[in-house]
Amino acid sequence: MSRFALRLPGKRIGLLVAVVVLTGFAAANIHLVYVATSSQPDCAAHFKTPQENGAGFRAAKSAC
């Protein structure tokens, strides 16, 4: 081994930890994007027509 490797083992451990953390962060974000684009939620119950008194929620553009 070289003297450099013997003198600075903390930098190698720090670099390894940084790589592991960044890999985990990237994997979590890739999974989030995959789930968001591959899932289709069920239709939620909502009013189909406007109510007279304005109460309740209505979808702006219903997909179902």
Image (cartoon, rainbow, N blue to C red):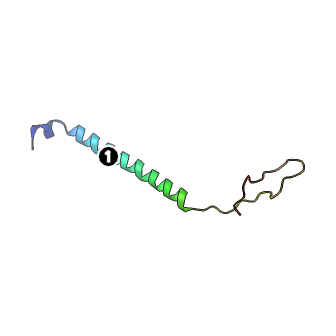
Furthest toward the left, the residue is: 2
Seen in the picture, residue 64 relative to 11 is either above or below; the reply is: below
Q: Quadrant of residue 42?
A: bottom right
Q: Name above or below for residue 57 compared with residue 38.
A: above
Residue annotated with mark 1:
19
Picture quadrant of residue 36: bottom right
* Residue displayed at 74% across by 52% down: 60
Number of marks drawn: 1
Name the residue rendered at 57%, 62% in the picture. Answer: 39
x 28%, y 42%: residue:
15
Q: Is residue 26 above or below residue 39?
A: above
User: In this orientation, which residue lies closer to the viewer: 3 or 60?
Assistant: 60
Classify residue 48 by image quadrant.
bottom right
Q: Amino acid at mark 1?
A: Val
The answer to whether residue 15 is left or right of residue 27 is left
Quarter of the image for the N terminus: give it.
top left
Quadrant position of the C terminus in the picture: bottom right
**Extreme residue toward the front, this view:** 61
Q: Secondary structure at mark 1?
A: helix
Q: Percent x, y for residue 37? A: 54, 58
Query: Horizontal and vertical percent for residue 46?
Result: 77, 57
Point out residue 41 in the picture as x, y percentages from the top left corner.
Answer: 63, 61
Please state the horizontal and vertical placement of residue 44, each as a whole percent of the image: 71, 59
In the picture, measured across the screen, residue 49 lies left or right of residue 34, that is right
Q: Of residues 50 and 16, which is closer to you in this image?
A: 50
User: Badge 1 local density, few (<14 within 10 Å), some, or many (20+)?
Assistant: few
